[in-house]
Structure formats: structure tokens, C-alpha cells
Amino acid sequence: MEYCDTHTDVLDWASEEFIVPYYFIGDSKWHRYYPDFILNVRTTTNQRQTWMVEIKPSAQTRSPQTKTYTNARRQLRETVEYAKNQAKWKAANEFCVNKGWKFVILTERELYPNGR
């Protein structure tokens, strides 16, 4: 948040103030997704662009099928969570495309490229 307050190209921002409806096939219900941030930024061509930003640990952005599990409950929980995230991000991306916005998922790799 300090970055948003101090970066000269961030014109304004809000945290979890926006709702994107999404459908999760796992329970056959509609849900509400609150992206972490909405930012209005100044682009390199001095245009105003809106970004919807989600911040997640990189482990939650990768399919759990690539891991080896010793605990079946953990595997199920992580698989369901991954599927929910995919449904949220698909809905968010479609929403942003329709509005001319940009949807971005940031992990520690982007936030801390040189480590902490």
C-alpha cells in the first residue's frame, strides 16, 4: 500500500472495494470476488489506465497436481482452492477485458524480485 501512496504513476487506488461476481462449478453457486486492489495508473504514454490487482503466494497460482502429497485432505483443500481461484481470475479477466482494464496477479516473485 505504501507503494500505491508514494509511486508518482499511481493516480489513485482502493483496496477490496470492488466486487466481481463469479460462478464456481464446484458448488454450482455464484459468489463474490473482492480483488485486492483497483489502481488508476499513468502509463508510459501518459494515459490513464485502470488495473485490477490480485496478490497471492506463487504456490497458490500453480496447479496442485504438480505437487506430491502425503495428506489427502490437504490435497483436496488445495485443489478446491486452486479451482476457486481460477474461476475468480477468469471472471476478473473477462470483466477487465470488457471494461478496457488490465487484470494482474502479483506474487512474491514480482513484489520481491531480489528476495526479502
Image (cartoon, rainbow, N blue to C red):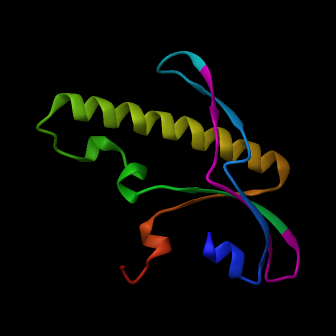
**Residue in front for this viewpoint, 17 or 57:** 17
Image coordinates for residue 66, horizontal then vertical, percent: 26, 47
Left or right of 101? Residue 33 is left
Q: Residue at x 49, y 17 (%)?
A: 27
Q: Position of residue 49 (x, y in %)?
A: 82, 66
Q: Seen from this angle, which residue lies furthest right?
A: 47
Image quadrant in which you'd find residue 43:
bottom right
Query: Is residue 77 positioned above or below 27 on the image?
Result: below
* Residue 104 or residue 73, whichever sits in front: 73
Magenta span of residues: 30-48
> Does the magenta-highlighted stretch encompass residue 36?
yes
Indicate the quadrant where residue 72 lies: top left
Q: Is residue 40 visible?
A: no
Q: Is residue 58 above or below residue 75?
A: below
Q: Which of the image's four quarters has the C terminus?
A: bottom left
Residue located at (14% from left, 34% from top): 71
* Residue at the image position 22 percent from the left and 46 percent from the top: 67
> Can residue 113 be spotted in the picture?
yes
Whether residue 50 is in magenta: the answer is no
Q: Position of residue 61 (x, y in %)?
A: 43, 51
Give above or below for 15 relative to 68.
Answer: below
Residue 5 placement: quadrant: bottom right
Image quadrant holding the N terminus, namely bottom right
Considering every residue shown, the one lying at the far top of the view is 28
What's the residue at 56%, 35% (across, down)? 87
